[in-house]
Amino acid sequence: MPVHNADIAEIFNRIADLLDIQGANPFRIRAYRTAARTIAELPRSAADMVERGEDLCELPGIGKDLAGKIKEIVETGTLAQLEELKKTTPMELADLMIISDLGPKRVLALYKELNIKTLEDLREAVKQEKIRRLRGFGKKTEEKIAESLEKLAAAGKRFKLIEVEDLVKALVERLKRVPGAEEVIAAGSFRRRMETVGDIDILATCKRGSPLMDAFVNYEDVREVVSHGDTRSTVVLRSGLQVDLRVVDQESYGAALHYFTGSKAHNIAIRKMGVKKGLKINEYGVFKDDKRVSGKKEEEVFAAVDLPYIVPELRENRGEIEAAQQGRLPQLITLEDIRGDLHAHTKVTDGRNTMEEMAAAAEERGYAYLAISNHSKRVTMAKGLDAEGLAREIEKIDSFNAQSRGIILLKAIEVDILEDGSLDLPDDILKELDVVIGAVHYNLNLPREKMTARIIKAMDNPCFHILAHPTDRIINRRPPLDVDVEALLKAAKERGCFMELDAQPDRLDLSDVYCKLAKDMGVKIAISTDAHSTAEFDFMRFGVGQARRGWLEPEDVLNTRTWPQLKKLLHRK
C-alpha cells in the first residue's frame, strides 16, 4: 500500500486539529502543522526517503521525534499517537473546523454541550435552532454556520489541486508502464488547472489485448472499485478521490481529449459552432453525415470550426472563443517568464530557512531578485518585526547585496493593515524599503463597506505597493473577505498600486476571475509564492496556472521584469 506525501500531511494536520480542539500547547500544534506543510510541499516522496534510509531531520521543521513519526506512518500506514487521540476526541470533530465561525473552542463546546460530532449532527442542531441557545454563540453565529453548511453542500467534496497532483501523477505513471499502453493523460478540471477538482478523468489509448483496465482497478491505492468495464472503469482511491479511466480508439483520441477536458460550457459552444457548419462534434470525433472526418488530434476539433488551438486553462466559455475568432487570444504567461519572487519569509519570523538559504534557492531557480518580506509586529504568533527589527533586516540585506555577485535581495515587509486602515509600522521605516506589501490578517469580519474602505485607506499611504492575498480566503477552510474587489482594483489603478496573486495552493488569491478583471482594468499583478521555506518556491507553478486561467500575459505581471524595470514601476508619484 503506497504512502503518499499527502497521506502523511493529512495525519499530521489531523493531529494538529485534534490537539487544537483539546486546547494543547499552541507551539506543539504549530509544530505538527509545520511538519504537514513541509511534507506536503516536498518535491520528492518521503516514503522513498525512508526506504533509502535518508535523514529526515534535514528537512525544515522536522526533528528527531517527527522524523520517527514519519517513518512509522510510512511503515504502518497510520500513527499510534493519532489512534490514541481519537480515543478521547472524536476524529470527526476536525471536519467541523472547515465551517466558518467554528474554531477549536467552539467545536469543543458543541461536542460537550450538544454531543455534535459530525457535519450531519451540526446540520440537525442548526435545523432545531439549538446552537443559538449556547453561551458564546447566538442567533447570528447560528445563521452564519447555516450559510456555511449550505455552501459546503452546494460545492460538494472538492480537493485542492496540490492534494491530488502526486496521486494523479503516480497513477498516470503507473498506467503508462502497463504493456500495450500508449497515450495516458489526466483531463477534466485537473488539466484546466482549476484550484479545486471534484474527480479525475483519465483518458488513454492502448493496443488490443492490453491489461490496462485490470491494472487500473487493481492499483494498490484503490479503496473501492465502482465499476469495471472494457472501455470505462471507475475507482475511489484511499484519499476519497474518484477516478474514471476511459480507453478510446486512437482515431477518436483528440476529440475525446477535448470533450473530457471541458468545461461543459466551452464544449457546448464548440458543438453549436459545429452544427452551424453541418458537423456533429462529440467524444468520438468530428462527423459529417455520420462519417468521421477528423478527431485524431485535439487541434483538429478546433480547426473544424475555424478556430486556432485554445489552451486548456482558457476553456471556460468566458470569451476565449470570440477572442480566437478575432485572432486576439492572449499569449499566456509561462513559468519561464518569471524573473523573481516578491513575497518570501525567513526564520526571522515564521519561515523555516535563513535569508541566505532562501536567496541561494531562488538563485538556483534562475531568479534575478527575491523580496525578503517578513511579517510586521501585529502578527505576534509569527514573531513579527517592529521598526527596530526591520532596521536590522535592512542592514543584513544591504550587507548581503554588497557581497553578492548574483541575485539581488529586495528590502520588503508584509505589513499588517490595521482595522482603521493605517499600517502596522511607521512611514519612516517603510520608506526605506524596496517593496511594501500590505495584508489583512485580523478583524476579518468587518462589513463589506468598512473592509473595502479599510484597504483603500491603506493604499492611500504612498509607501504602499502591493496588496497581499487580496480576499484572504483559505480554500476549503475560510471564505473570502466581504470586500468589493472591483473597488479595490479601481483604487489600485488610481494610486499606482498592484495586486498579488498568492501562489500558495491553499490560497491562490486572486481568483482567476479577478485576475481577468484586473487585466481588463489595467492593474498589474505580482505572482508571488509567499514562501515560508525554500521548497515553497515550487508553488510558483500553481500561481502561474491560476494566472493563465485569468488570461494574464507576461506584460500583466510585475515580476516578469528586470529589477531596474520593476523599480520604476514600484516608484509611486
Image: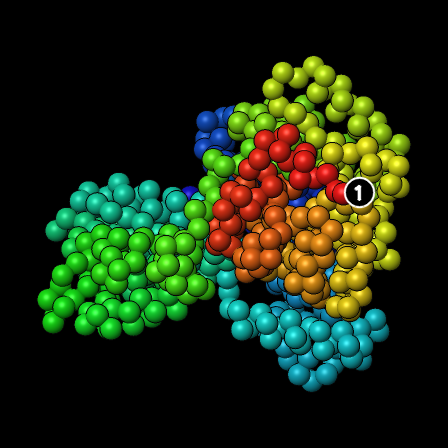
Residue at 19% from the left image edge and 54% from the top image edge? 296
Secondary structure beneath dot 1 equals loop
Tell me where residue 535 appears, x and y as whole percent: 57, 34
Q: Is residue 269 left or right of residue 278?
A: right
Q: Is residue 336 left or right of residue 562?
A: left
Tell me where residue 243 appears, x and y as whole percent: 37, 58
Look at the image and tell me whether residue 229 can be seen: no
Using the image as rendered, state which of residue 450 and residue 386 is in the foreground.
450
Kindly indicate the quadrant of the structure image that contains residue 328. Answer: bottom left
Residue at 72% from the left image edge and 57% from the top image edge? 491
Q: Is residue 177 left or right of residue 55?
A: left
Which residue is labeled 1 in the image? 463
Image position of 131 with respect to 245: above or below: below
Task: Give, as a three-letter code, the residue at label 1.
Answer: Cys
Q: Residues within 10 Å of mark 1 (few under 14, many from 20)?
A: many
Image position of 296 with respect to 152: above or below: above
Using the image as rendered, state which of residue 242 and residue 74 is in the foreground.
242
Q: Is residue 38 left or right of residue 165?
A: right
Image position of 444 with respect to 48: above or below: below
Using the image as rendered, state which of residue 275 and residue 75 is in the foreground.
275
Quadrant including the C terminus: top right
